[in-house]
Image (tube, rainbow, N blue to C red):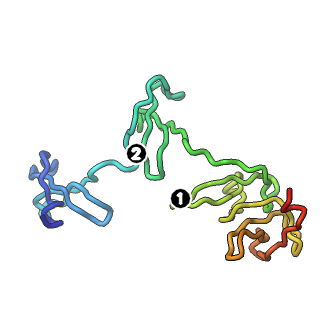
Amino acid sequence: MTKAALFAEKQNESCPECGADLVIRSGRHGPFLSCSSYPQCEYIRPLKSQADGHIVKILDGQLCPKCSATLVLRQGRYGMFIGCSEYPECDHIEVIDKPEETSLSCPQCGKGHLLQRKSRFGKVFHACDRYPDCQFAINNKPVAGECVHCQYPLLMEKKTAQGIKLFCASKLCGKAVEIKDNEENE
């Protein structure tokens, strides 16, 4: 079966504009429903709504704090989350994977703390919890300490060919910092 035949599959729905059958077609952003009498009729519709996330499980006994409807577990574009079953009338959501807070303060603003976060590609990075006011972020594990070269108040751990080493977290410095023998033994 060819790709064109696979994605020109007839549905049991008719076009609301001209009454012809709707077919599944493949496009740049994935499959979609289209009128079979294209190009005379240009009706198209997404195959499924991807904006709100589909329901994975109904969470019995847990009620929405906004509207008292049942909460559901949803799979969305950026992962799993808990949302109201009455979406889009009620827009209550709860994040499942909350970022882990470290005890390290932000070296850039001095007011916030560093959080361990995940990018949309699944990579771990550390950023200030005051974002967007403070946009400090590093891709390596932060370590408490001060750079001996520029006195920047944060170091970061990097894996090198010689093993794990500490470097200055400042983008202007970035030099390697020697680990003292008494710090290794602790």
Q: Quadrant of residue 27?
A: bottom left
Q: Is residue 38 left or right of residue 124?
A: left
**Residue 58 image position (x, y, % from top left):** 40, 31
* Left or right of 71 on screen, residue 140: right
Q: Could you tell whether 103 is left or right of 71 in the image? A: right
The residue depicted at 84 percent of the width and 72 percent of the height is: 178
Residues 73 and 90: in front is 73
Numbered circle sitting on residue 81: none
Q: Where in the figure is residue 122, as x and y percent of width and height?
A: 53, 58
**Mark 1 burial class by Cα count in 10 Å: few <14, some 14-19, many 20+:** few
Looking at the picture, tell me which residue is in the foreground, 145 or 186: 186
Q: Amino acid at mark 1?
A: Gly
Q: Residues within 10 Å of mark 2 (few under 14, many from 20)?
A: some
Residue holding disc 2: 53
Sooner in the amino-acid sequence: mark 2 or mark 1:
2
How many numbered callouts?
2
Q: Amino acid at mark 2?
A: Gly
Please tell me whether residue 124 is drawn above or below residue 12 in the rendered image.
Answer: below
- Which residue is painted at 13% across and 56% down in the image? 9
The residue drawn where x is 82% and y is 59% is 144
Name of the residue lying farthest toward the front: 185
Q: Which residue is mark 1?
A: 122
Q: Is residue 139 above or below residue 71?
A: below
- Give the answer, above or below, for where 105 lies relative to 138: above
Task: Say which residue appears at 14% left-offset and 60% top-offset.
Answer: 8
Of the residues tagged 2 and 1, which is closer to the observer? 1
* Relative image position of residue 47 (x, y in whole percent): 26, 51
Quadrant in which residue 182 is drawn: bottom right
Q: Secondary structure at mark 1?
A: loop
Where residue 140 appears, x then y in whole percent?
68, 65
The image quarter containing residue 145 is bottom right
Mark pair 2, 1: CA separation = 19 Å
